[in-house]
Structures are given as structure tokens and as C-alpha cells.
Amino acid sequence: MKAFKIYCGGQFITTQKSFEVINPFDGKSIAKTWLASNNELDLAIRKAQETEKELARLPVFEKYGILSTIARQISEKKEDFTKILCQESAKPWRYAQSEVERAIQTFTVAAEESKRLPGEYMSLDWTPAGKGKEGIVRHFPIGLVAGISPFNFPLNLAVHKIAPAIAAGCPIILKPATSTPLSTLMLAGIIDQSGLPKGAISILPMDRNTGNHLVTDERFKLLSFTGSPEVGWEMKKEAGKKKTILELGGNAGVIVTESADMDLAVNKCLVGGFAYSGQVCIHAQRIYVHDHVFETFTTKFIDAAKKLTTGNPMNPDTDISAMIDEDNALRVEEWVQEAIHGGAKALLGAKREGTYFPPTVLTETQRDMKVCALEVFGPVVVLEPYSNFASAIEKINDSRYGLQAGVFTNHIDEMNVAFNDLKVGGVVINDVPTFRVDHMPYGGMKDSGLGREGVKYAMMDMMETKILVKNRD
Amino acid sequence: MKAFKIYCGGQFITTQKSFEVINPFDGKSIAKTWLASNNELDLAIRKAQETEKELARLPVFEKYGILSTIARQISEKKEDFTKILCQESAKPWRYAQSEVERAIQTFTVAAEESKRLPGEYMSLDWTPAGKGKEGIVRHFPIGLVAGISPFNFPLNLAVHKIAPAIAAGCPIILKPATSTPLSTLMLAGIIDQSGLPKGAISILPMDRNTGNHLVTDERFKLLSFTGSPEVGWEMKKEAGKKKTILELGGNAGVIVTESADMDLAVNKCLVGGFAYSGQVCIHAQRIYVHDHVFETFTTKFIDAAKKLTTGNPMNPDTDISAMIDEDNALRVEEWVQEAIHGGAKALLGAKREGTYFPPTVLTETQRDMKVCALEVFGPVVVLEPYSNFASAIEKINDSRYGLQAGVFTNHIDEMNVAFNDLKVGGVVINDVPTFRVDHMPYGGMKDSGLGREGVKYAMMDMMETKILVKNRD
Amino acid sequence: MKAFKIYCGGQFITTQKSFEVINPFDGKSIAKTWLASNNELDLAIRKAQETEKELARLPVFEKYGILSTIARQISEKKEDFTKILCQESAKPWRYAQSEVERAIQTFTVAAEESKRLPGEYMSLDWTPAGKGKEGIVRHFPIGLVAGISPFNFPLNLAVHKIAPAIAAGCPIILKPATSTPLSTLMLAGIIDQSGLPKGAISILPMDRNTGNHLVTDERFKLLSFTGSPEVGWEMKKEAGKKKTILELGGNAGVIVTESADMDLAVNKCLVGGFAYSGQVCIHAQRIYVHDHVFETFTTKFIDAAKKLTTGNPMNPDTDISAMIDEDNALRVEEWVQEAIHGGAKALLGAKREGTYFPPTVLTETQRDMKVCALEVFGPVVVLEPYSNFASAIEKINDSRYGLQAGVFTNHIDEMNVAFNDLKVGGVVINDVPTFRVDHMPYGGMKDSGLGREGVKYAMMDMMETKILVKNRD
Amino acid sequence: MKAFKIYCGGQFITTQKSFEVINPFDGKSIAKTWLASNNELDLAIRKAQETEKELARLPVFEKYGILSTIARQISEKKEDFTKILCQESAKPWRYAQSEVERAIQTFTVAAEESKRLPGEYMSLDWTPAGKGKEGIVRHFPIGLVAGISPFNFPLNLAVHKIAPAIAAGCPIILKPATSTPLSTLMLAGIIDQSGLPKGAISILPMDRNTGNHLVTDERFKLLSFTGSPEVGWEMKKEAGKKKTILELGGNAGVIVTESADMDLAVNKCLVGGFAYSGQVCIHAQRIYVHDHVFETFTTKFIDAAKKLTTGNPMNPDTDISAMIDEDNALRVEEWVQEAIHGGAKALLGAKREGTYFPPTVLTETQRDMKVCALEVFGPVVVLEPYSNFASAIEKINDSRYGLQAGVFTNHIDEMNVAFNDLKVGGVVINDVPTFRVDHMPYGGMKDSGLGREGVKYAMMDMMETKILVKNRD
């Protein structure tokens, strides 16, 4: 069996505790890897701290060189990355491919942004107290970063912490999800050869106990967590003095208005609703359709959903495959059943087979059913009609969460209202909330998070502002 | 009779050549003032140059103080300014009032922007050649500015040159229109008491021969001209080494689509078409209406135009009064007659009475009639139907000019097409091209001009970029 | 006796618990005011929440009008504000005056910044996934803000929370220090008449128990605290889901190099060391002087310090007066005695008289003495020699704190090293760390805080980023 | 003999007029190429115009792809480019290599900047007139660009027009210097295969008559000229309505102060003074040295200059080779002789051999000698002592030109004075004026030019600002 050593303080090592990574689609073991213990974590922290000064002083052309090299190397091993992603996460090939492309782009943008840290020049003589003085504001690396990334985009969501850290000049210790650590460890091999000072990055699978040190250890200056709301908000309380960035989930909604292009809306909602079995933070979970077009939309949507191809994620035609594990499939089943018992109608799907849960469409749901109110993180979509735009906005906002929302409309006024009134981090016109490109600011309002990622934004969170006050004359 | 001395090198003076300013409405003399000769201009230039160093070194709080003081002083003399504007230009009271408010705002914004000159900080080590180096970019006053302002906004268009010049730290010599110099000379009285170094600003009415030195004299580093296209482009050729900013006119167009709010469109077009007898650079001259709503729009528009109040500009109810002089009224009459003889229909107006020209609406015009192809600068509006949006865009673009355009629509797609495809400096959705606020970038494409005004933009044109390259480590 | 009602949900009210505010200089009661209980706080919260929508929708010109009006009103009551500040805090008249000027400036800058929220436009088509799309990033008010301000700048440090909150469109409940609530309550009178929606601001003295709800109540979306490090970091842990901004203190240092202008350094250090009895977050506590000039500096510094005028803060000549209360004076005395017993030499002062503590200069101290290692918050300065610049930098950095630092030098290299290597939020060349103007980013690294104030920066912390993704073509 | 076809409207063509390109070092013919006539130019213009719409609509990822591809292709042919540069311009191998590296960097930066066009978002409701409105400012390609580039950096100065044009979405017709067209034509081969729409770029050697159409033809919207001041300013007058950017030369100066690192100053001045025989716009022509260190500097400088290696540019060790042609060598000889006859002393060099002119150092010159007052564009350096910093600043400023200046100092005050008072586009501390990296703003004050290059700055000049005004609520 293949083995992936873990990357600790600039060395690929094994530990006393190995484990196997399982392909959720066929339940077979893919490879063996290891869990870091407190000892390895401590070593990684100390090695990382040793690199701080050197990292902070790296000239731009070296950072740029390192980040570009990594991007190019991933690009040259696209197939390998896609394959391991498919296997460890059961993400269908096409989506896995797109994730690899995005990881390349994330490193590319980080390379470019490392040149463009937004220094500020300011006159300080706005009152006589500042006469003859000027200020220069620059941003300096905050220090050691703790990154925790989830299973659903094992590569690119880790990269969204690693690439900005390199660009900002911070060492980082990243804990990948233990179910999907392989693509990140493959990336470690590339980073190790990129010229980055050894120890600047460690990639360490850990159990929850060890991982908790990422939250509590005061040697970390920033905790950047992507994962579930419950865990995230708990971490914030335990984080001590460190800054905390939380990229959590939600129950993102879509509004399909009367003026919408129906075919566009259907096709986009299909992807937003079922891509990677809805295991996406910005999964299009709730779709509100104007009642004049509700039937049309519903018919088209169900018809299209029926045509989705199920199967082995390695098959390039597969649209939907297994969920990450049976526990999750069971949970989704339970939530769907709860809804049906409460009066909801299943227009499609709803029947689990092992780790596979089919594309499921519910309607006539109630606002407090779990499939509506919580993050379903499964291939379940709720379709409901609405009668006027203001009420559709209210329905989207009637949630603890606020990550992104999609609005299909051709009306300027509706676009304006949506942007002003939706309590979400991103309002996407004529596309699903699932839309994300890697340089845009991304993150949630309300319980969906704290702070924004997107390369430039993540970099800024990893830096501290310092002003130089000096004489000008 | 009242006399307004001219403001030369920090002194209020008279010269050998006096002239009287006439109220276009009743033909009566308002006040006497003087023309600067080459001698006075030369003196003003030399005095201005003497202030350059001091101006360049004024701390921000002093510039801010001067500009705020001027704004406050105008505010305290609002009535006086409004009255003199009414009298010298026959601008109806309400519009004169609004011009005075805008002049206050222009000085206020200039005060604020003087604090916020956009210095840049940049790393220079993008390649090994710049290792250890950083750059600081600041903007320094370009030197003496020549300003030439027109009769139609005698106060605020002069202020759009004076206020940025003070904020940028440049001396300026301003030539107001000889028909309307009084409001600017009243402003000179305020500036003189504001604490600005004497000589930094001169306001000198001149004849064309003397005025030509503003264009050709190499002691001026920037010529900022607002006026007619013919004159402007000629000046550019004569300007030698100096930078030239041209704010010229056009034959601005409006598109009223099917999705437009008709009443809004009618009311806005009324103002855009007839305010100050159309003597406005962004006068709404050509209105293209979707053929499904052409009749509705036309009926409402004509009805509303008939209700406009004619008369003495000093009357607060007056909507439309005399044109600036009989020559202009005659020219407009001639152009309208040319159109009618060529087959156009006059739906309203078209009959001159002395300096008064009534609100005039034409239709069934041809693209090369003067009322369509040239800048009519009179209360004449051309109404034509269109059948699809792309053709409406083409009609607007079928012009030598490209200042601003208005589009009444509620469709996102039409907004996008308009912004992408209209060859104008400003695309105004759901308002007339006549819309302008004083901090926005304003200026034309094609023959409508070169460069942009709007306080911050005008300031930047009055400054030169300098980079400091220094070691960072 | 004068009474100051507290400002709760748009009403001036009294409560069941009154208390008297004492002049620390003479121990006499100045006025009576009231403590808010949990009930009043809850009422204020509910009233504040009711204003959220209206505040978020205030047009810029209204916010600008409100903030400008407040600035102008304070300006018209400068004397009253200065007097009450003197009385409640024993701050000498001259420094009280300057604080009032700064409060005016803080409101002025907030007015201006409300116009200039940094929206972003970005192309999203950096990869084919974003083809035809663009993004518009705007910032929206985060919601209800809890502000806690300290006794040492009772007016301006409260204003640094209130003014940005208005500019950002957030309601705020401010808890002033209970020892110095009067100037802020006087400000409440002005705000109440400014046109701001009633309830948007409450100013409520509270005891610690009630005040703790500002930290823990989840209806607040941001906690902005200025005060001591111990309290601040505890609050962060209790803050739940809300964002937390901490402006804490430190033991700021100064380096006086051989190339320094000695007289400038002495004069500035005098102010930095003893202004308001050192009760300033950026008090110049530790001064490191190059050993070649140590004696010169010390002699001049002691001579000058001896000439400081002691006495009634209301006297315009007074340089130094009473500390805020006897407890603090006792604490400072104890720390100074600890140092002296540990071997430090007192070159000046060191003897308390009631609430008065004299300008005190120590030398031959040890790094872990309280007067070195902790925030002394009293008129105590430690003078020590150093032999090379690198070691001086190390000494400054040898601290849990990192707010600001001053460096007197004329060498570019030393300026660069200082900016790169000092672990502080602000490096001030040729001035003391005590330098602050109200628009610059201000705040600490390490235990000195989290986040930056300064009008624009505080505003940004009070807003959430939202992106609109839309089609461009 | 090798032949390089010219690149016209997307085709490699020959014309009726061929000519040979000569190696200035050995006088031998390198290759044959052709001159475009008016016909070919007209064809190129028409083809270019046909691409305008397509270019304006290119998504960012396509522009980025094209520009990155070109950068990568040059990189893969580094040797070929270096060789042809050496041959056509007699630029020593090392400097030719560095020019090729810079051309790669210029394309790389243009790729990155194409993503980051600085759109602006602004609120427009600063007064009630703008209530409910917002503005979005974007920049649109200005249209067809005419580029004229000089012989001294045949590749990279052409690339400074071509790369921004592609990034901005403008077609461009570039006229390379007829003495050095080969490297640019080699680049044409790469561009042709890059995916850029055919016709978007033409590279056409022309004689002066044909070239003059680039200046006068109104189909060009921007003229971007790099070359001599005389020609440049004449062009501005003939340019009609088009924008004109002039990157001209100067007689750049250096100040070496007492606090300077002498060895650094000597080494840098050697490169600034003699690299590529001083045929560089920012050649360090005048060096002012503090009189306390004048002798030291002079001795070291002459010693070092004597060690420069002369010879074949293809030899990697060569420091200095032939000038571009004998005419120029003759002119330099004449100027040097004029100086010597006028009393100047030659400390080194001064004797021409054919096209070779040796490193020449003069002292005791007069301000109005040609070697001081004009742009010598040859390996001639004037060394003069100064007694105080202010007078050194004056000497640098005593010139019609103002491109860049170098100041060797370690004093903050001198750095400040230099930045504030030197009338140049770039002040370089502790380096020669010859310093340039490709993303920094670069260009001259006074007679040295109009506008700034540097990728982002050049791009902005190639774009027009358009504002979209729309409702926000």
C-alpha cells in the first residue's frame, strides 16, 4: 500500500500512530499515513518560529519565485492531484479537476499579490499637531499561523491558507481533515522543493486532542479555521489572544424571479444543489421561485436532476457519487425523513444506499425543519414558491447563517434590493451562491463566519499594520 | 453704477479698458468692470510665480483652512451670489441657487481632498535588480495654471479650476467669460480674505488677443479650458509644451426604453432639455424613445413642457428665461428653421422673441441636421423613436461627441450594454446626461474633450508624479 | 450641585443609583450623575436595534451633516468642554484644550470619511470560471457596537468610538469611565440635537457588573474597548461571537541616538514622559540614550523637568497636576519604591503627596522591575544608556507590549532598522511614542492590543464586507 | 544573409524598400529587413481598427494568457534575443542579457496588471442632488496607439509600449528605430503565435516621412514616443487631437554627500556613467561631490574607470563597446573638445577611435558647456565639487531637464530635501539616476517629458475613464 509521510518542520516523517485513508466510494484503503502527536506538533511549532525572521525578510522576487514554482509544479502533476482527490474524497473527476485548477490559480494569485501589499502614504499635517510630518503604513507578518481545513475541498481550502501565508511571510502549520489528507501531503512534496525555508510549513494530520493545541497554544498568532459553525464558534472562545478567522457553512439560498432566464437558472441550480453531493459550504440548499414560474422551474429542475449520472468518481461522466462517509449519509437521511414526516413532499430522491445519497428535492417544508434551518451538507434541495420579492429576501434572511445567496433576475431594482438587504457575504446575480473565484473576498455574515478569505484578504489578516511617522520637510 | 474691480496679482485694480455687463433678460447694464491687457496679465503671471514655492509648502491644515473658509463665506453670501448669477447670465433663480450650492460643495470637497492626495508605497524588489529597495510616490504641484471658464456656469465652472488649484498647491490665473465675470469677481473678494498667499490667484477678464497668451505662454504649465469644441481643439495645437485639459460640449443623448418609469423619464428630460435654456454642456439634446412608448412619452413630454413658466430669471417660479444674448438666440432659430425646412416637425416652440427662445421639440429630423449633429446649446430637444436597444446605442454613438448619456431602463442587460458600448465619459442610468455632482469624474470622449474634471481628478492633473527610491533594509 | 442626566435610548434619564464625580485635584464634588442598571442597558440596546435599518440607509449627506454639526457645536462650546475635562480628570488646562481640539478633528475626519468608504470594483474573469462577471465590494454596518472608554482621554477616546460608529451607520452604546463621565455626557447633549436618529447612541455610566453585558450580550456585534491589558484580554475570552477591538496600554520606549537633535529630544521626552502625569497609553516610559550622549541628555532632561509647573489643572500654566485618584498614586509610589529598593537610582521626584505624584526619573533599573516591565501609567521615566543601535532596539522589544516607539535619529539606516524591527504599531522618528493624530492608524502589537483605531480604520472594523457578483457583458 | 520580414496587420511581409542592419562594433551587416511605406502603414492601421472591438472585449484570462505566453517564449529564447541585441546595438552582452530579462518582466507585470485595472466605486449622495445614486468608474481602451521607440533599449522600450497596449486592450503600431529593428521583429514572431487577434500589433520600420503619420493621423488616439527632447516636443505640436506621452532624455545628476558610502557611490556611478556608453536616457552625466570627499571620490572613480574592459559586445566580460554609429561618436568628441577648449580638464578618456568613444571624465566645466547643459548620450561624466547640500540641489536643478537624480546620503534630512526640491521624476537615494525597474512610474519633469511610463501607468494612459451612474436603493 502506498504511504504518505507527514510533513513536520521541513522533514517528511512517520510517527507512532498510522492510519489508512479510505475511498468513500468503494470503501477500499487508498494509502497509509500518520497522525502527529503533541511532540511532533511542538517540534513543528519550534521549527516554524525559527523561520520567522527569514520569512519576514524574503524579498518579493523570492516569494514570487516560490509561489510561482509551486503553481507550475501542481500544474505539471494535475492528473496525479486529480486522481488522489477523487479517491480520498469521492469527488467526481470533473469537480476534482476544477479544484486542482483552482489551487493553481490560488498560488498564482498569491504570487502576484505578494508584490502588491497595499502600503499607504499619508500626510499627517491635518492639524498643526502634525505639521511637517508624514506617515508610511506597511504591513508586517503577524507570526505563526494555525490552519485547519476541511474534507470537502481538501486541496484548495488548504491552499487558501498556505498560499497567503507564504505571500505574507508567515510560517504555518496546517491540519488537513484526517479523512482527506493525501492531496495536501502530495502538495507538501512540491512545497518542500520550492525553495521555501524548511520549517516554514508543516502539514500534520492530527486527532482532535492534538489539534486543539492549534486553538489554544499562544505561540500561534492567528487561527484560520474552515469547517462547521459549531466547532468554529467554540474555537473562538478558546483562542486566547490570537486572532481568529472562521470560514463556516450555512444554508445558502437562491431566488428565481419571474424575469429570470429559466434554463440558466435550472442549470446553475443543478450544479449548486448537487455538485459533490452538496458537501459544499455554499451549496444551494434553499431555492425560492416566484409563484408564476414555480411550476415551470420545478418541472425542468426535476427533469434535469433525473438525468444526472451516478457512479464512480473516477469516471469523467459522473455527476454525483458517494458522500464522504456513511455517518453523513445517515444524518442526511434522518433529516430528510424528519422533513417528510413533518409534511414535506419529496419530489425526487430521498433514499440512501450505503454512502450514496441521491439528488433529493423537497417542497412544502417548514422553516424550522433541519433541512431548511441547518446546514444539510448533502445533495438535498428545498424548492418553495414566493409571491413577492421582499418576502423572498426575508426567507433567505430567515436563517442563522449568511454566507452567500444567488438571485436570478434581470431587474436593476431587484439586484439593488438584494445587494442592500441580503445578510450574506456575497450576493450573486444570475448564478448560484455556490459561485466562488479565488481572488474575491469570501466569507460569511452572522453564524457563517468571521473575516474574509480570498488571497488578498487572507494575506491582510495574516499581517499587522505598522506606521512610520517621520518628518517630511 | 456698481463697479467690480478685477483681481490681479493679489490686488483689486482697474485698467484702461472698462466695459459693462448686461443682463440678457432686460438688456440693462448691471455693473462695470475692466479688461486686463497684456501688461496686467504679465504682472499676474510674475506675481503668481513668486508664490509657487510657498504654495507648494503650505501644510495641509492651512490649505484646508483656506478652502473651508472660502466655502463658508460663499455660504454666508448665498443670496448675493445667486442674485448676481441671475443678473449676469439670465439663469433662473432656482438654477442659480443650485449653482451656488454646488460652488460651496466644490470648495468643500477640495478642502477634504487636499488631505488625501493619493501617495503610493511600492516594493521595488520584484526582480533582483530592486533588492532591498522601496518606492514612495507623491504628487507635487505642476506650477502655474491657466484657467478659462465659460458663461453658462460662471461661478461653479470657474470654481472647478480654482478650488483644485488651491488644493494642489498651484497658482492660477483665471479668465472668466466676459459676458459673465461678476460672480467670479465677487468670489475674488472672498478669496482675497481667505489667507491664501497674495498673487496665487488672479481673476482677469480679457479679450481674445490677451486671452490667447494663456494658451501660448510657456510660463503656464497647464491649460484648463472649458468651452466650445472648436476653440478647445485649436488651443491644444497652440499650447506648446504645456498639458491641456479640455472640457468641451456635445449633443448628449437619452434613451427611454420600454421598461422605463415614464413619469420619471419625462420629468428628468424636461430639466435636461430646457434647464437654463439648454445652455449646458450636458444638455439632453437627443431623446430616443422605444417605439412602443414613443407616443405616450411624447404626449406627456409636450404637455409638461407647455407648463413651464417663462419670464424674469429673478422670479423664483421661472423655469426658462432669456438666452445669453441675441446672437445665440438667432443661431438657434436658424438651426431650427434649417431642420424644419429639411422635413423636421416642430411639436412645440420654435419661435424666437428677442433673446428669448421657447422650449422647442422637434421630431422626424435627419442625423446630419445641425440640431442633431452639432451642439445646439439652446432649449431644443429632438425626439425620435427606436425599435431595438442596439440601434438606440448606435444613434447615440453616431456623433462626433461623447460627453454623457442617459438611459432610462430597469434591465440589467441594457445597463451593461450601455456602459460597455456608449462612447461617452458618463453613462447615467434612469436620469438625464445632464446629471453631474462635483466630485465625480466628468469629461468627454471623442471631440467632447480631453481629461476629466471633478475635484480629485482636476487636482491630479495639476500635479506631477515623483518617486522616491530608497533602501528599505 | 450640577447634575448630568445619562443618555439612554434617545432620552436623558436618571436612575435609582446616583453618584458624584470628584475633582481629583481638590477632592471636591463637581456634579452628580447616575449609573445605568441592567434595565436601562437593555432598553438602550432595544432602542439601538430599532434604529439599525434607518442608520444603514442614511444618505451620505445626512451623516456628513450630523457629524459636521457635532464638530461645530463642540467648537462653539470649547471652553465648557475644556473646563469639565479639567475638573473631572485633573488634566491640565493646556492638555484639556488640546483634547477638545482633537475631538473636533475626530468628528470632522469622520464626516469626511463617511463619503469615502472604500468600495472596490474587481474583474472576476481571471479564469474561465468567472467569464463575463464582475464584482462590486461594499461595506455594510456590522450592527450594534459596544464601546468602553477610559478615564485618561474621557472625551476623545469616547469620540474615537462614537464618531466612526455614526460614520459607519452603526448604533453604539458607550460606557465612559465612571470617574470621568461628564464630558461625554455633555457631548450627549450635542449629539441629541444633531439630527441623528434617537436611540442610535446611548452614553451610560455603569458599574462593572452591568458593564460586563457589553462584553457578553450577543446582541452586540462588536466590542471596542480602550483600557488596561489585563481587563482587555479577559474580555476577548468572554466576548462570544462578536468581533473585539482592544486598544490597550504598554511601556512605550524611546531611543535617543548620537545623531539626535538633543534639545528636540529633551523637549519632546518631557512631554512624552510627564504630560497628564504619564496617564497616557503611549506615555514615554523607557528612554534609551546612546552612551556618548547619555550624560548630556540626562542633565538637560532633569534640568528641564525641574522647571515643570505643578498645581491646579485649571491654571493655564500648569504642566502637571494630580493623578486620577489616590489609589493610582499609591500604586506608582509602590512601584518606584520597589525599583529603588532593587538598586535603581531616583534622579528626580519619587515622593508622593496625596493624589499628586511628582515627575520622577529613574536610572540603573533592571528589566523586570515593575517600572520597566509593566505599564506604569504615572509620571515616571526610566533613563538608561545603550551602546549600539541593535541593542537599543532589543531593549524596546524586550517587553510584553508593543504600542508605539520613538526614535531620535537623522540616519536613514537607523530609521529603516527601527521600522523593520521594532515590534510596535507605530514607529515615530524624531518624536516621542506619545505622538498621535486622529486619522492615523493607531494600535498595538503583542499584548498592547488587537486591531487599529484612527477614524477610517475604526470605521472599517465597524463594517462587514459584501460582494455583489454580476454579469458585466 | 538573414532576413527579418516586417510585421504588418498580422502578416509578415516584405516591401519594395529593403535595408541592411549594421553591427556598430564591426560595421558588418547582420541582416536585411524592410521599410514600411505609407501603403503598408495604412493597411496596418485599418487592420488594427478592425480588432478594436474584439480587443476591448477580451476576458482577463485571455489577455493574461497571451501576455504570460509571450513572457515565457522570450524566456525560452533568451540567448537568441541577447545575441541579436548585442549585434544590432553593440550593447555589451551583460547589459543585453539584463535588457532581455527586463522585457520578460515587463510582459509579466503587464499580465498581472491586466487583472487589476483600478475600477472605482463611489457614493454620489454627498449632496441631496445625488440621493440614492452611486458611481462605478471603469477604464476602457482609448483606441489605436502609435508607438515610437529608440535604439538604445531596442527591445524593452518597445515592450514598454506593446505590453501595456495588450493589457489595456488597445491595438498598437510600433515603429522601432531603423538602426535596431531586429530584436523587436524577433518579438513579433512570438506575438504572432501568442493568440492575440491578428492585426492588433504591427511592427514597422519606417523612414521619417512615413513615421510622421504616426504623429499626425487622427486615427491614432495616443502617441507614445520615447526619444530625444527636440523631436518629442515638435511631435506634441503636430499631434492634433490625440493624447501624447513623451519619454525624453536629460542630463541626469548625482550628488555624493559626505555621509555617503564611497565605494558604493563609485561602483554605482561607474555603471550609471558608462553602461552602454552612456547611451541611456538616465545616464549619470553630472556628478556633484561634497568637497570634503571630492578628491577621494575622484581618485577611486578614475581608478575604477580605467579598469573597465573594452571590446566586442558579444564578449561576456566587455563593459564598454562601440557607440551606435560614428555620427554619434563624432558628436560626443566635438562636445568634449568644446569643453576642453573652454577650460575643462579631461581626467580620463576623451579620444575617439571610429565608433568607439572611451570612458571620459571631465572636471572644471562650465554650466553652459554642451557636456553639462545638453544630453550627451555618450560615455562622458562631469565631476564637480560642491560645498553645501542646497547648492548641490541647485546645480542639479539648473537644467532644462528633469528625468531622475541620484543622491548618495545617509541623512534623513538630505533625503527629504532631495525628494521635495529636486525637479525630477525620480529621486534615487544611494543609487544612480540610472536606476529603473519596470513597474515603477518613470518619466521626466520639465523638458524631459510628459506623462509616466511603467506598466500600470502606461496602461492608464491607454485607457479612458467612464463612469456609470446608477441607483443604489
Image (cartoon, coloured by chain):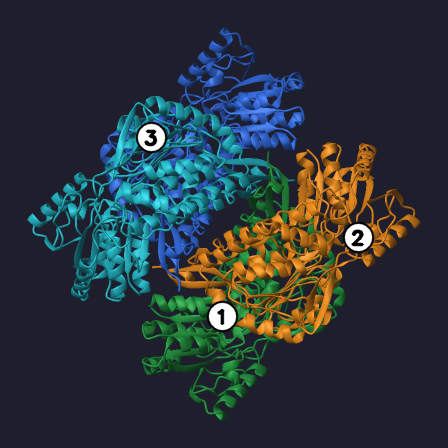
Chain colours: A blue, B orange, C cyan, D green
Q: Badge 2, how many Cα within 10 Å: few under 14, some, many 20+?
A: many
Viewer-side label of 1, 2: 2
The residue at the point 34 percent across, 79 percent down is D297
Viewer-proximal residue among B141 and C292 = B141
Mark 1–mark 2 distance (CA, rounded to whole Å): 45 Å
Q: Position of residue C43 (x, y in %)?
A: 39, 23
Q: Amino acid at mark 1?
A: Lys
Q: Quadrant of the C terminus of chain A?
A: bottom left
Residue type (three-letter) at the residue carrying disc 2: Val
Helix, strand or loop at label 2? It is loop
Q: Residues within 10 Å of mark 3 (few under 14, many from 20)?
A: many
How many residues crowd mark 1 within 10 Å: few (<14), some (14–19), many (20+)?
many
Instruction: State which quadrant residue A416 falls in.
Output: top right
Q: Amino acid at mark 3?
A: Lys
Pointer 3 indicates a residue of which chain? Answer: A
> In terms of depth relative to the viewer, which is nearer, D331 or D181?
D331
Q: Which residue is mark 3?
A: A236
* Label tally: 3
Determine whether the residue tagged by mark 1 lies in a helix, strand or loop. loop
Q: Which residue is mark 1?
A: D423
Q: Nearer the observer, disc 1 or disc 3?
A: 1
User: Is residue A128 among what the camera can see?
Assistant: yes
Which residue has dot 2 on it? B376
Task: Say which residue appears at 55% left-offset and 63% top-offset.
Answer: B192
Res B100 label: none
Q: Judge left or right: residue C278 versus residue B109.
A: left
Question: Residue A309: percent from the left, percent from the top?
Answer: 56, 22
Left or right of C312 in this view: D434: right
Front one among B132 and C454 = C454
Name which residue lies at 65% across and 46% down. D57
